[in-house]
Image (cartoon, rainbow, N blue to C red):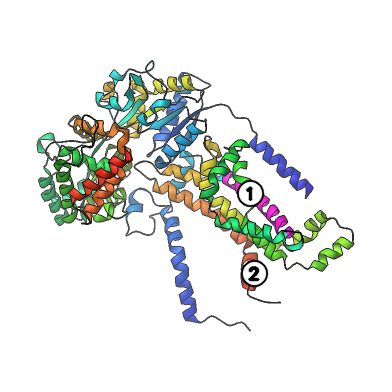
Amino acid sequence: MEEKAKPYQIIILCFLCLIWLVPIILVFLGSFKVGDELFDPSKILPKSFNLKNYIDAFQQGSFGLYFLNSTYVSIFATILTVFINTAAGYALAKFHFRGRDSVLMSFLGTLMIPLEVIMIPMFLVIISLHLADTHWGLIIPAAATPTGVFIMRQYLLSLPDELLEAARIDGASEWKIFFNIVIPLSLPAMAILSIFSFMWRWNDWLWPRIVLQTDEKKYTIQVGLSRFIGEYNIDWGGLLAMSVLTMIPVLIIFLAFQRYFVKSLMTSGMKG
Amino acid sequence: MKKLLLTFTAVSAFITNIAMAEPLTVLWFSDNNEGKVLQKLADKYAAEENPEFKMNLLEVAYKELPNRLGTMITGKTPPAIVRQPQPLTYADVAVNLSDYINPEDYASSLMPYYVTDDKVIAVPMDVTANGMIYNKTLFDQAGVTPPLTVDNIWSWDDFHTNIQKVIDNSNAKYGLVWDFTPHRFSTLMYQYNGHFFDDNGSLSFNSPEVIKAIDVFKKLHDDGIMPKSVWVGTENPNSMFRSGTVAVHMSGSWMLSNYNEVESFEWGVMYMPKGDRRSSVPGGKFLQAIEGSGQEEEAAKFIAWLSKPENNKIYVTETENISPLLVNENIERPKNAENFQIFANELANTNEYAAKDWKNVNLDKFAKQFRDEIVDVLVNKKTPEAALNTAEKYAKRKIR
């Protein structure tokens, strides 16, 4: 039987929501302020919803192009990440081979190594493969993530072995089983991984900053945002406007896949 | 699924293999509209001189510039041109521009920054001067007249008294905000005849003169003229001044284009107070061509064209900067003409050690620590003497 939330619970939850939302709301409102409006702390609302900061940022910088670059990198990286991690998770969950658990442990062990430790050797590999200054240099290194492999492996453990055995008895090849049975049944987990992967790639700054050296037209939007920061001045209007725009795609992806995300959170504690 | 994979591969191959023409890469950082103006000049250059000329303007944040340039040079993909605050750092890889420009066309105080061993390693693009910008509305409210002529220049005691009047009789919350950089602090140091290096290049800032400057600075904080939130906290002085609640911003000429956007109060430039003497601190940006780009000659030609008086005039008037060219000393400006005259006068009365110190590449190695030692003095963690002793030990270790 569903229990209705009590009024005080709703108030507490709304208050907590506000704490999280206030910085985002201030960024959104600030993006419409021009001139001195931004520096007057007594005025929260802008005088008008003026698009000047957005228009100026697009006209002065190639932000339309950076947006497309970020979209392209994030989408292709997500597709590659989900495919590779699902395949790896399936192998680690459903195939029994010598050293399987050691392989899984070594994948998980790499979670303890931050990017800053491995970025120099990774960059040298990128250089030798002629992937520096290319979007593939952003897409390929991040394709196989230990977190993604772990998520998919844990989800696929719940896949009935009998289903796979039945398919094998019927003569299906392993690739046919993977594409026709495993992937359709893994959609909830793949949706969650897609959200995470898209967010990671969209918000990534350090690796694109390292890989994209000489061609400004290949910048992603996070790297492009640094153009607003000069030696003495920060163009706050442009920075806030572009920051608002960078939030929108992630919001859309989350809204598109949220039912899988919320469902998995709600059922994670249930047995049977 | 197979069709999807094939389409994916084809689309990616197409996008990543589109052939691009070879443009001239310019590594740049902008305050306000400088990148936009450079692009406009590049289009003019293409129209007048070379229709095939294309510029790849690689804009980065100022703080990223040294890392990016170093990485590009190490990776053997140097930019053809870089906008440099400190050309001497890369003197070894700079193209010699002696055949393209004449240093005698430029202000002599800048020469140590870009001429070394008879080699012209960069060309000045614009000059900056430290100075004070004041909130005219607050001064008018308080009935205080700022020093706008050389005859009325205040001492720091006069400044203290007059700014306190502004705070007491207007909507000002604070009298003065000061940029949190060693470069800006050094203005006060030079006004008391302090300097970082002596004529032999040895460290010389641990001196009674610098202690006097620190004492003046600390008094402004202790008496509430300056908020501690800038030098001890993380408050941005530009934002504070633009809120209209601060009477004076100790900054420089580069802020004029930023403050042109201010509509809620009137502002202007006033003469800085003097210590034992007057002084500002010169600065500037230079264009440097880097060897190894494969486009050295084209880069040198573009720099030489930008350095022509008529083209430099376009750049400095539209970006609100001071021209380094002697022939452009008194150019007509649509805005801020009087303000630039004050900055020019400040530069003309500057301690000669200001340029000598700031061209020294060793200063970068300890300037930040020097600034942080002053913060310790402001919070009463150290005396000025102890702070300078610590800074000196650190500096000696760093430039060994």
| Residue A32 among magenta residues | no
In reply to whether residue A85 is colored magenta, the answer given is: yes
Q: Which residues are magenta?
A: A69-91
Report whether A149 appears left or right of B251. Answer: right
Q: Residues within 10 Å of mark 1 (few under 14, many from 20)?
A: many
Principal SS element in the magenta part? helix
Q: Amino acid at mark 1?
A: Ala
Q: Kindly indicate whether the residues beneath marks 2 and 1 are on one polypeptide chain.
A: yes
In the image, residue B322 sits, relative to residue A178, either above or below, namely above
Closer to the chain start, of discs 2 and 1, is 1
- Label 2 Cα neighbours within 10 Å, binned few <14 / some 14-19 / many ≥20: few
Marks 2, 1: nearer the viewer = 1
The residue wearing badge 2 is A263
Tell me, yes or no, if residue B17 can be seen here: yes
- Left or right: residue B350 versus residue A172 is left
Would residue B178 be found to the left or right of residue B66 on screen? left
Chain under disc 1: A
